[in-house]
Image (cartoon, rainbow, N blue to C red):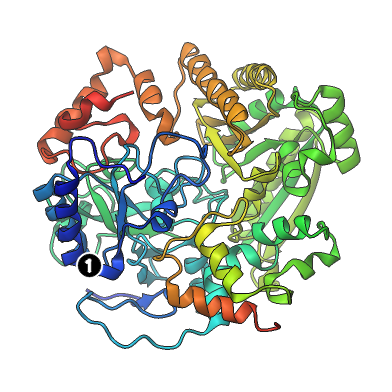
Amino acid sequence: MKRTALTLLAIGLIAAPAASLAKPKPAAVDGKAAFAHRCGVCHRDMGMGTLAVSRRMGFGMGPDMVKAWLENRNDLTADYVVSAIRNGVYSMPPLSRVEVSDADAAAIGRYLAKKK
Amino acid sequence: MKPLPPGITAAAFDRGLKSFEAVVGKDQLFVGDDDRAAYEDVYGPSMSPYHHPSAAVAPGSVEEVQAIVRAANEHRIPIWPISRGKNLGYGAAAPAMNGTVVVDLGRLNRILEIDVKRGYALLEPGVGFFDLYDYLEREKIPLWMSIAANAWGSVVGNALERGFGYTPYGDNASQICGIEAVLPDGGMFRTGMGAQTGNPTWNLFRPGFGPDWTGMLCQSNFGIVTKLGLWLEPEPQAAATVDVSLPNFEDIGWWIDTLAPLRLSRVLPSPPNTGNWLGVAAVASQRSQWTDSDAALTDQQIDAIRAKMGLGWWKTTLTFHGLEGAVEAQLKATLDAINNAGHADMKVTRWKRGDPPETALKARPTTLPLQMTNWYGGRGGHLGFSPIVPSDGKICLERIRKAKRRFEEADLDLYHSFTMGERYTTSIALITYDRDNAEMMDRVDKLFRHLVNDAREEGFGEYRTHLTYMDEVADCYDYNDHALRRLNEKLKDLIDPAGILAPGKQGVWPARYRGMRG
């Protein structure tokens, strides 16, 4: 069978082990990359999360909306971020540990709290 | 409190969970309250007594999916597969029946193959629209996607639920070619040409030899899809869009009648979604900015909002892809037809290969439309009511008039849109709400049931619905004493005698749980 292009690609930032029996030591998670992959769909650019947060913070849909990007804020703590991931905030639903693993959540929390 | 599956004791349930744990390991079995919360219907009424999962399990391979299905049979534990669980407005990740264990396929997240020459992708169910889009962009692969309005979800899951995008490939289920699925007994098979070992046309020719099971696996509880081939659109030579605003409520009649022949003849190659003013207003503002009243907005209030925001009553975008000359010809024929039929404000945008790629008129993933759920404030959600009707202006105008009255009776603001196929139109009433407001949710429930009954009286039924209304909608399909449902359930009992796979999905119940039908 000849293919024009054959690509095997794990979407996850850390490829899931092929079998659960294999338990390699977890690699360090890059918080910025994890944020981009797991949260960026809503919390960057014109995402729903960006707009919702901007509205709550009083920035509306104008040029100040960029201040509502989570990466631009300096008032977030790691614990709050992890809690938001696990419990949800307003219309943001809680995210499963399949979608955002504990390691990813912790790394995202550290990344967003970096300005503290 | 954790619900148990009907008819299963706590001890038997625990034995079932242990068997799942033996397959996936402790880390991929989720039984805590916070874990289960992530698999609830996160856009449904928060006080609903229905659709609560008992646990979730996340296999990491097809073999693990098979092992979980076998264990579910052995312990008679009902399971509910999800791709990414973002079926928002239709139940999200939640099961139809309380106590069902969610099988989260999110770890099966590989793009297995992209064939540029033949224009398809072979995907696992955990691949999201953003994942596939990012990959195509990063690798500069000249294939374009059809993307759902909510792009947070799974490409595979959306196609299997018969979701839509707004490009020439916008009927996503029609682009499915080649499925691998695990059967309710733990066996595994491939559809179409994939039934022959090593056949290289699995993802090129859908039907295969004999009955085609592709449709049997859409909106279905006959199997768990673990791989899916999906046709992607080769990058066109040129593209054009027409952003359209129609000023009046009644314009939808002539608009549908004007577009219908263009869609039928494929002069207009993409399914346009024509939605009312609230689609924009609810993204760009919240209700509290306009009124303190709990009553549905009056026509005068609506006119004031539209004037302030510069909105017509209806808004849509028409999309053309193809050879440059063909696009221009289709565009001209479409604009001529519209200008001859009525008044529409239109803005044409063109793109051709060689123009800056960031200006390409291709579908891009976004979650922004979900912002509509915040119209009422609080923790928002939405519910879609989507019957299929003929592409007929008179019928669509009558439907929107009736829907408007029903929304006003319920003191809810009307969002309505029409997505036009080649011969039919999907008439979509979208109800947004504060999911924690019990009184409002009661009105939403009554409204939804009115909409189902109104459509049924006109001879129409939904193509897709929320978990709570699956039985009610399935009951609309009553020809020859519900012959189709009886056939589906006869087959269900043959291939799933233990009744473990997604009981109640689309109103199809196994014998074991048939008494649960609502």
**In the depicted view, which residue is nearer to us: B277 or B193?**
B277
- Please give the residue where the numbered disc 1 appears in the rendered image: B24
Image quadrant containing the C terminus of chain B: top left
Residue B188 vs residue B215: left or right? left
The residue at the point 15 percent across, 59 percent down is B19
**In the depicted view, which residue is nearer to us: B197 or B84?**
B84
How many labels were placed on the picture?
1
- In the image, residue B212 sits, relative to residue B452, either above or below, namely below
The residue at the point 74 percent across, 40 percent down is B335
Image quadrant containing the N terminus of chain B: top left
Callout 1: SS:
helix
Q: Quadrant of residue A116?
A: bottom right
Amino acid type of disc 1?
Val
The residue at the point 56 percent across, 45 percent down is B269
- In the image, residue B337 sits, relative to residue B149, either above or below, namely above
Residue B448 rendering spot, x and y as whole percentages: 53, 24
* Res B394 visible: yes
Residue B364 rendering spot, x and y as whole percentages: 60, 61
Q: Quadrant of residue A92?
A: bottom right
Residue B479 vs residue A89: left or right? left
Tell which subunit mark 1 falls on. Answer: B
Residue B202 rendering spot, x and y as whole percentages: 25, 59
**In the depicted view, which residue is nearer to us: B332 or A58?**
A58
**In the depicted view, which residue is nearer to us: B155 or B186?**
B186
Label 1 CA crowd tier, 10 Å (few <14, some 14–19, many 20+)? many
Residue B450 rendering spot, x and y as whole percentages: 53, 17
- In the image, residue B128 sits, relative to residue B212, either above or below, namely below
* Res B317 visible: no
Q: Quadrant of residue B333?
A: top right
